[in-house]
Image (cartoon, rainbow, N blue to C red):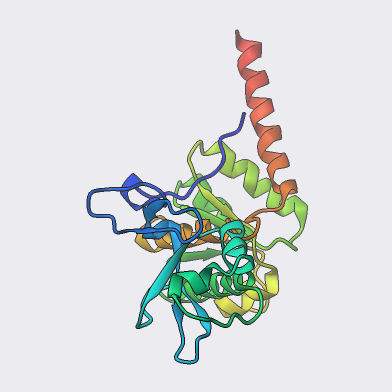
Amino acid sequence: MTKKPTPPCSPAGHPGVRTSSTPTRQCLVSKAVRPTSDLIRFALSPDGLVVPDLKARLPGRGVWVSADRDHINTAQQKNLFARGFRQTVTINGDLAQQIENQLRQDLLNRLGLARRSGEIILGHENVAKALKARQVGAYIGAHDGAEDGRNKLLRLLHATDRDIFVCGAFDSEALGLALGQENVIHGAFRPGPACQAWCRLATTLAAFCPLTPETWLRPLLSAADAQQQKIANHE
């Protein structure tokens, strides 16, 4: 069975892993005490509007909810924010969707910054060369790109026998706007701190929407089956 690609980050930096210095808070819904990296902070505006505070920097009292769509929907539907803030509150629209949109925009903004600092590799051929040289920490493909080219890179990624993060949450237009090109189909993050931080944020997004279409797993599973057959033939 193929091992699912995971963010290339140290255990201390991976969501859900607690160290002695990791700050914790209680989830408003489950009451479980969890690392703040696994939670979303919400603040209250002066007029009583509940506001997602993804960077946990807004002033005033805050409440924390586990960073996934189900917990946030439960908090909104059961009016738990009023209990947490101990006053009447106002909620405009779907909070979970607002968070997904903010996470998406933050990830795209970070791609633009990484591109300017030389952390991003673009183009099918360049990404393939980087994969062969083991210089890729994350593969970022447009979900509306051609299947053939993407599958070649995914099979190559599998052949490296390394945990490389895979993200297909954006279309070519969104990637192009973020990276300063008309359309971007294939991109990759060079290994390093910027890649690790981006992957951790993308892991949070995965609790709100799929990072990769199911069809992307097919070439990985096919490659794994072929490898198992090759091993069996030599036994």
> From the viewer's perspective, is residue 157 above or below residue 93?
above
**The C terminus lies in quadrant:** top right
Residue 194 percent location from the top left of the image: 39, 64
Closer to the camera in the image, 185 or 129:
185
Q: Position of residue 82 (x, y in %)?
A: 51, 74
- Residue 190 visible in the snapshot: no
Q: Examine the rendering and report whether any part of residue 2 can be seen.
A: yes
- Residue 75 position within the rendered picture, expressed as x and y whole percent measured from the top left: 57, 64
Q: Residue at x 44, y 54 (%)?
A: 31
Please, which residue is most extreme toward the left here?
Answer: 20
Identify the residue shown where x is 68% and y is 35%. Answer: 221
Q: In the depicted view, which residue is nearer to us: 84 or 102? A: 84
Q: Would you identify the image quadrant in which residue 104 lies? A: bottom right
Residue 49 place in picture, x, y as percent:
53, 85
Which quarter of the figure is the N terminus placed in? Answer: top right
Residue situated furthest top in the rendering: 235
Q: Furthest-bottom residue in view?
A: 47
- Could you say which is closer to the camera, residue 76 or residue 163? 76
Q: Residue at x 40, y 55 (%)?
A: 191
In the rendered structure, the answer to whether residue 114 lies left or right of residue 214 reads left
Count of picture labels: 0
